[in-house]
Image (tube, rainbow, N blue to C red):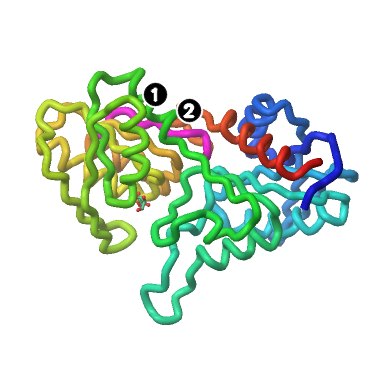
Amino acid sequence: MKIKSDVKPLLLYFEDEQDSALRIAKAGNLTLAKIERHRFPDGEIKLRLPEQLPEQLVILRTLNDPNEKLVELLFIAQTARQLGAQHLTLVAPYLAYMRQDIAFNLGEVVSQRVVGKFLAGLFDAVITVDPHLHRVATLQEAVPVTHAIVLSGAPLLSDLIAANLQNPLLVGPDEESAQWVAMAAQRHGFDHAVCHKVRHGDQSVAVDLPDISMKGRQVVLLDDVVSTGHTIAQATRLLLAAGATSVDVAVTHALFAGNALQLMRDAGVGKVWSTDCIFHSSNAVSMATSIADALSMIHEATTC
Ligand code: R5P
């Protein structure tokens, strides 16, 4: 679908993501409007959008703590089309439910498929950062929209590591992190390797270190997501026991559920760096410019 318009897209955001919205709007020279949100005493929510909307609309909603946010997106997308929007882009720097991509037991919900189809039914384009795609090759397979754009935090995290450490060794805590570790390592010529991980439960993982010397190395564990922190904590303990002089952490999505940060610190983690995909005190690099560039690309592709 091509839209006849030279009006720039409007970026809609929620109050709790205002800082992130301002950074994206500044990088892309976009206009902004806040979505008003009221919670009724019984827990239901009421949202209000601007009365008139341009043809192209961008909604920023990062999907940590996703359940209620998915309902918000349903309300917003349907209402936005009634108010005149013709092309809707979702910017979800963190895209939830991507890790459940297969039914391990009969009857289990494959959340990735359900959430992907749900979002594709609401939006024409989706931009996200380092989605956890394990058994599907592309984001479009999981979220079948015309423009399914994947950005990565690995280059910016790599630059940050290069500015802070000399000759670091990048280690991925599991095989799935290999893609991000390789990307970050290649950018500055860092040594790199990945561990082997077996997950036994939410709070229980077994990690095997790669077969290389850790003695005297400044190690950075790099991954897409830290959730409970058990993966990083376990890898850190092993790395320090194997002779690493320090273990820092670089992660795209700082989910940090419960006491994850403390667990990692207790295991011996030094610095923790994250992107601003999820707001957290460890945020050290911003994805705003990359997101603004992707929005501009979608805008050009969809207007005439
Ligand atoms: C999964 O493979 C991800 O890349 C992370 O390694 C995982 O989600 C981390 O989970 P947790 O912090 O709970 O160990």
User: Residue 81 in the image: x percent, y percent?
Assistant: 82, 55
Q: Which residue is mark 1?
A: 160
Q: Residue at x 47, y 39 (%)?
A: 152
Q: Residue at x 37, y 41 (%)?
A: 180
Q: Image quarter for residue 103?
A: bottom left
- Residue contact at pointers 2 and 1, CB within 8 angstroms: yes
The quadrant the C terminus occupies is top right
Residue 47 within the segment the image draws in magenta: no
- The residue lying furthest to the bottom in this view is 106
Residue bounds of the magenta highlight: 269-277
Which dot marks residue 285? Answer: 2
Amino acid carrying label 1: it is: Leu
**Towards the viewer: 275 or 258:** 275
Please report the residue visible at 73 percent of the width from the left and 56 percent of the height from the top: 45
Question: How far apart, in angstroms, are the residues tagged by discs 2 and 1?
Answer: 8 Å
Q: Extreme front residue here?
A: 304
Q: Amino acid at mark 2?
A: Val
